[in-house]
Amino acid sequence: MTDKKSKKDSLKMDQVLADIARNRKMRENTYRARALNLFPWVCARCTREFSGKKVRELTVHHKDHDHDNNPPDGRNWELLCIYCHDYEHSKYTDADYYGVTEIENKEEPPSETFKAFAGLEALLRKKKE
């Protein structure tokens, strides 16, 4: 009797897990497709651009971490590359582990006005003299 019950429970659990996986896949496909149509294919954190097959490395991040909050205008989403998305979620896990109550976002977006070789010409002229 116990063996039949455990098989029945196992089958029921398999069905529940299959339903969860199917629903998750359907939900992801709908908001992912919408997000890819709404936003440029650029990681919102590291600004890396994606095209072709590399677009699969872009993930849809829910800003409020609620995967059921999917407004049609996408205001709860941002596209993040797989690395930035992992970092975004791991920082909360790390904060819990270390007992940090407030997470600061110390990352600054890259400055478009930064010029890596600014002043190089003057330095080279100075060295020649």
Image (cartoon, rainbow, N blue to C red):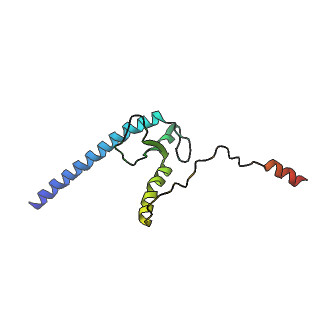
Q: Is residue 7 above or below residue 99?
A: above
Q: Is residue 129 left or right of residue 115?
A: right
What x and y, as percent, mark residue 43? 52, 44
Depth check: give the residue in front, 13 or 99.
99
Q: Residue furthest right?
A: 129
Image quadrant where residue 113 sits:
top right
Instruction: Give the position of the N terminus as an image quadrant.
Output: bottom left
Which residue shows up at 82% across the image and 52% down it?
123
Residue in the image at 39% along x and 34% along y: 72
Q: Residue lying farthest bottom?
A: 98
Q: Could you say which is closer to the camera, residue 103 or residue 35?
A: 103
In the orientation shown, which residue stands out farthest toward the left?
Answer: 1
Task: Please state the horizontal and vertical placement of residue 15, each as a whole percent of the image.
Answer: 22, 48
Q: Residue furthest front?
A: 102
Give the side of residue 52 with respect to residue 30, left or right: right
- Out of 14 and 127, give the one closest to the viewer: 127
Numbered-mark total:
0
Coordinates of residue 63 in the picture (x, y in percent):
43, 46
Report the side of 25 relative to 56 (left or right): left
Residue 44, x across and y down, in percent: 52, 44
Residue depicted at x 43% and y 66%: 99
